[in-house]
Amino acid sequence: MRTLQKFLLFTSLLVFFASCTKPKVEADIWIRGGLVFDGVSMEGQQMDIAIKEDKIVFVGCADTIRIEAKKTIEAQGKIVSPGFIDPHTHADRDLNKTETAHNHPFLMQGVTTVVVGNDGSSFYPISEYKESYRKQGVGTNVAMLFGHGTIREQVIGKSDRVPSAAELDKMKALAKEEMRQGAFGISTGLYYAPGSYSETEEVIELSRVVVENGGIYDTHLRDESSFNIGLVKAIEEAIEIGEVSGIPIHISHIKCLGLDVWGKSTEVIDLIEKARGRGVEVTANQYPYDASSTSLKAAVVPRWAESGGLDSLFYRLEAPATRERVLNETVTNMKRRGGPSKLLIVKLPDTTYVGKNLEEISAMLSIPAEEAVFEMLKIGHAKVVSFNMIEEDVNRFMGLDWVVTGSDGNSGHPRKYGSFPRKYAQYVKRKELISLADFINGSTSRTAKIFRMEKRGVIQEGYYADVIVFDPEGFREEATYTDAFRYATGLDFSIINGKIAVSQGRPVDAYYGRVLEKGDQ
């Protein structure tokens, strides 16, 4: 018996001394035992992650080291991933208000970084909002673009005309200053006024300034359907801008919108892949829905009619010389989006009409649908969801390694609350269209690479600690077209810059995001 006791004591001492000789890692957070997808690899591994301050300090098997952590997260049976990076959002409309700066709709999807200033429209100047976000705090990291339409409006207003040489020089100076203040690049909304009034050469000249200052070009194409130059020509324009200026091109929410262009995804993909083969850097993002959303005015009102603003639009509507043209072109634009029954009002100051489509509103008011459009615009800013894509095109784009996940998140469409978990639940799990690794890599590292975000989007030692833990069975969207404001489920933990922002499925009452700038290390 004494021999056995001596043996057990000796063994215990060996274990003790062996553990003491292992390298010690001091950490604030230890994520233990999860299936880790690092954002780059195509297979997950059972690994441990240690985080200290705002960085990842260890990734690997904890048996080889001794981790001493203030907080341990048990992640057995869970998926551990870099936090998602959303390349196209309108979250700036929430971040600039104290009551919504927490950014919960994105945070609860697993998003740790949002890009703002998209579609050619940004808050101006960037320097002012950058300081505001830093002072009040933000719930996720923020990367800022400056809007082409925004600086165009600063110089020549809402007019439908070409800038003079002096005005273009002023726009280029403003672009350079916005880049100097930390913008990651320029965004264009060539479909929307006033960006739609610009010619390609104007955009090329501004892009030259941006690429000289290390930025990228993010674009809402001039046409995603057949509203003006057509989808294919709009893709060719984007490629031309990249080829001539040398700037990396990122196409936002790539799609084939409307009956006229259904099935053209094959042609679009061929054009882009040929350009990539020539050395033009072209990428895109996509949201996993077959319905788009925008303002009612942008969706169906002729662009020429709104030159000068709303007052000018209503003047042209009432003027005998232009009224018939305005209404006829509005009818044509509604048809492109599937007709009045496919245009659902999701946001309007008068909630009487929210949740009804234009066909129903037309009947309620006993007027034609095209006239109902302008009655809604008289009430105030109206947003619509339009059901105008087919699954075949959505699927073709989603399977490409140069297409990453984005939400175009804005109020009224479920994509603001559900894009990332929907892509996982619908296209990874249910349809098995893409692999889990493809989903994660296309929501993290690939996006970080496109936007030149340093040390984010990958679980790697020395990188910023933006890490999420989610339930492989429960991670899904809950928001729908009729109830668009429901948080996603299945996110257990979100860590942003080394701080726990979501704990056991609930957001904490704190703001751990940062305003990012190019070259952050």
Image: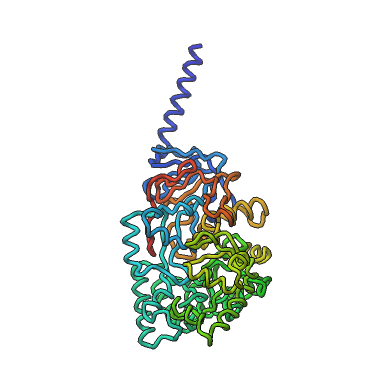
Q: Is residue 151 left or right of residue 401?
A: left
Question: For this view, does 130 lie left or right of residue 12?
Answer: left
Residue in front for this viewpoint, 518 or 22 = 518
The extreme top residue here reads: 1
Q: Nearer the viewer, residue 253 or 249?
A: 253
Name the quadrant containing residue 213. Answer: bottom left
Where's residue 171, x and y in %? Answer: 37, 79
Residue 155: horizontal and vertical position, in percent?
Answer: 36, 80
Residue name at image x 40 percent, y 48 percent:
498
Q: Is residue 114 positioned above or below 31 on the image?
A: below
Residue 264 higher or lower than 140, as above or below: below
Give the residue drawn at x 41%, y 39%. Answer: 23
Q: Residue 41: in sight, yes or no? A: no
Q: Residue at x 52, y 53 (%)?
A: 485
When asked about the image quadrant of residue 366, the answer is: bottom right
Image coordinates for residue 232, horizontal then vertical, percent: 61, 77
Q: At which x and y percent is residue 344?
A: 59, 63
Residue at x-position 36% and y-position 54%: 98
